[in-house]
Amino acid sequence: MTMLLAAPALLLIAVVFGWPMLRYAWLSFHADSVLTGLEPVANGGANWLRLAADQRFWLDAGQTARFALISVSLELLLALAIALLLHQRWRGRGAVRALTLLPWALPTTMMALGWRWIFNTPYGPIEVLARSLGLNSLDLLSTPSITWLVTVFADVWKTTPFITLILLAGLQSIPDDLYSAFRLEGGTPLQALRRVTLPLLLPYILLSLLFRLAQAFGVFDLVQVLTGGGPAGSTESIALYAYLNGMRFLDFGYSATVMLAGFLLLTALILAGTLLLKSVGLLRPLDR
Amino acid sequence: MTLQLRAINKRFGERQVLHQLDLDVANGECVALLGASGCGKSTALRLIAGLDHPDQGSIRINDAEMVDVPAERRRVGMVFQSYALFPHLNVWENLELGLRMRGGSAGARDERIRSVLEVLQLSEQAQQRPAQLSGGQRQRVALARALLRDPLVYLLDEPMSNLDAQLREDLRPQLRRLMIGGEQPVVYVTHDQQEAMALADRIAVMREGRIEQIGTPRELYLQPASTYVAQFIGRPQMNLLPAKNGVITGIRPDDLRLDPAGSPCAILSREWFGANQMLLVRCDRGDLRLVCSGETAIEAETCISWPSDCEHRFDAVSGRRLPSGCPPSD
Amino acid sequence: MTHESLTHGPMTRGSMTPGLMTQRSLWIALLLVWSLGPMFWQLVSSFTTADALVNDQLSFWSRWTLNNYRDLLSTDPPFWRYLFNSSLVASLTTLLTLMLAIPAAYGMAKLPDRWKGSLRAAVVGAALFPYVLLFLALLELARTFALGNNLIAIAIPYSALSMPLALLLLTAAFEALPNDLEDAAKLEGLSLWQRLRWVLLPLIAPASASTAILVFLFAWNEYPVALTWLSRSDLLTLPVAMARIAGSSTYSVPYGTYAAATVLGAIPLLVLVLVFQRQIVSGLTNGAIKG
């Protein structure tokens, strides 16, 4: 039976994606840290109670959600603009498209230090530019209320090409005839964008939204290397907090709890978003 | 070599596609499976090829039971409606692939391929890819591939439906010469009754998974067993008059005559084809199709009649033929 | 904005006024600056002396040096080692993923629709999942089965993480093949292996190439699993090595050297992307359409 062929691959996926969740669920009801000699000891819901009261966790959750939502929104807008530009035909389009893909190819950690330098106070080019324009020192990386925007910027820079490609695929799937017909009906280009392009692009937008939201929620590489979670924990994400609990504080029980909670929060966020979109009627094109 | 199907049943989900199908194809005989889409003819073909498995029943090729033999080992030569040529290989490689996998010396292979290409006039196209060939050429490559299989049975699934009428006429004799002449039974699936009449020794008209009637083209034309067969065979379609006294009367358009002593009728439309012409007339019995010589002058009002012994009579409820008939007009 | 800007539009200059054209050229230029600027800056920094980095008043000619590269290449372990490790892991992962995903995709393409839908949904779910959340449990597995610090073993989780995307792309590719082709091959007497080898695999080659490059890039870029599974400095993959260099000392990081590392580390990736950009684009495009 041909299903036997699929078994190894599917099994691997099931194990690698399924087992951790089960393990976290189990671990979250145990204490497993230096205090217990790195052996799991059942402790009921103590981890969960701790989580509920853990201000740092909730702060991180909020920061992560904020990062994810703002980042993804900006990426979508930017990617749409770029996709519209790349969708037209002009000489050199292919080359430009390839070049705009490059940021996506580089590992986040690699550019992270680059960003640290670019935004460095007082020597980075941004600071130098600000000085030459007569502005005060921007101190972008050490101001708790601003630094998270730098992480957003870095994230947008890296992942926009990915979304651009997906939206470009969507644009290419819209037959030109539709625009011709719309134009003959007397519609303006801007109206065409709103009434022809966007509705047909919706599935692709939603796909990108879903994918990027999930990825952004798990942001780790960027914050660990660019800011280390600082300054003053203002850029710390759930994933980073879980990592710290596990690797630095060696509190595996709590780390598992944090991760599981993060996953549940993400699921809740996505469900809420889906319900919201459904109530506004935006998901109707997907009912096939 | 013979082919025998017994009590074949096949169901897809809720639909019973083949009901207790029986079929015998003798040595060298060509049987056409004729019917509309969905009647099960292509399914039957796939079962013979081994591409699908019947729910019940037996399939015997040369008296050997084949139901549990996989398609790879059945030694069946099939020509697909889409030709199914491997797009990434050129003509030569398309023909060589199967031969190579089945073993044998390279020299013998090359010899066989070369001679088949010559017979089908494809020698010049040997290095070309299917995309570069015309429809007719692709079909000939598909034929060549089936021939090289040296099969026990030939199966053809609407092989000419993608070709234009002219090409079909040119290829029919070639097809007959190459495949229908030999010892292998041939099963030919088509929805085109003219093709079936031209090529087959016997035609099985299929409907909803059953064989409505099987017989020589002549038998089906002269003595259709039901209204369905009567209307399927023969073009233009047989006229069926509304039921009277529980009987449906059928008259073929070529049996209708322009007869000043007949029933008056009005001419609704006329299509002239050169050697003959078809008229649609309205008379007291209904709207009828009539075929006559192209040279006949036609007036707007005319009279028609038909010999009563050319009438076909069918039961109004079951559609089955009632004893009656038309003597052969030769 | 014009109607032409929404459609592919003919590439005639006649339909666009000169003003519109230069406006578009401006946007294109901005786009390129945005995309390439930061990398370009790294390039510039890599050739800049340590002094010049902190002092923008130095004269132009005294700013440049090759020392950064010299320092980089004389580290222990040498920098090219990380490139090698990443290449090794990425190659193994790609191989493993393709070996498992291709037969699986073949099987999945043949499933009756009933099963296919839910299976597809599960695979899509896995593809969207933020895999960083898995690292703790995966680390446990590494410790339990002694898979840590082993460049071959790490290909296993990497393969699993890239498998959903590979399955989606390859299944779609198999589904796009006309059924007749495999039927014809069967009747020619070809066994399953022969059909795959001579007919099916050649026909899905473009999709396989796209999948391969996307998996390769994923493996090269991956961080959390590599961070936790690899600790020996001569076994680090590039992202981990870069992070380690970056984290080594926050105050006196040799930025020039780091920039040189970025440049050297980026070159293979940039070359890969430029060479295979068509495969990457079509892979992501098809993934989007089928997703």
Image: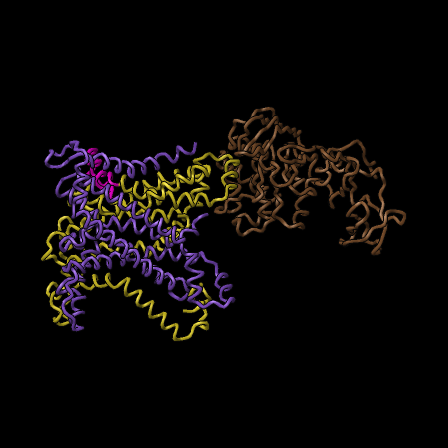
Q: Which chain is purple?
A: A
Residue C183 in the image: state x and y as whole percent. 51, 38
Residue located at (70% from left, 34% from top):
B202
Seen as rendered, the residue at the extreme right is: B261
Place of residue A178 in the rendered image (x, y in percent of width and height, measured from the top left): 49, 61
- Could you tell me if residue C146 is visible in this image? no
**Image coordinates for residue A75, horizontal then vertical, percent:** 30, 58
Q: Position of residue A175 (x, y in %)?
A: 48, 58
In which quarter of the view is residue C230 placed? top left
Q: Given the current orientation, which residue lies at the most extreme bottom position?
A: C18
Using the image as rendered, state which of residue C33 and residue B247 is in the foreground.
B247
Coloring applied to the structure? by chain
- Please provide the residue range marked out in magenta: C133-154
Number of callouts: 0
| In the rendered image, the vertical position of residue B205 relative to residue A164, given as above or below | above
Residue B88's place in the image compared with A42, above or below, is: below
Q: Which chain did the renderer colour yellow? A: C
- The chain drawn in brown is B
- Observer-nearest of B316 and B210: B316
Residue B157 lies in quadrant: top right
Indicate whether residue A21 is drawn in magenta.
Answer: no
Q: Is residue B167 left or right of residue C276?
A: right
Residue C152 part of the magenta segment: yes
Q: Residue at x 43, y 56 (%)?
A: A200
Image quarter hosting the N terminus of chain C: bottom left
Q: Is residue C145 above or below residue A183?
A: above
Residue C196 visible here: yes
In screen coordinates, is A47 left or right of B273?
left
- Taking the image as shown, residue A192 lies to the left or right of residue B84, namely left
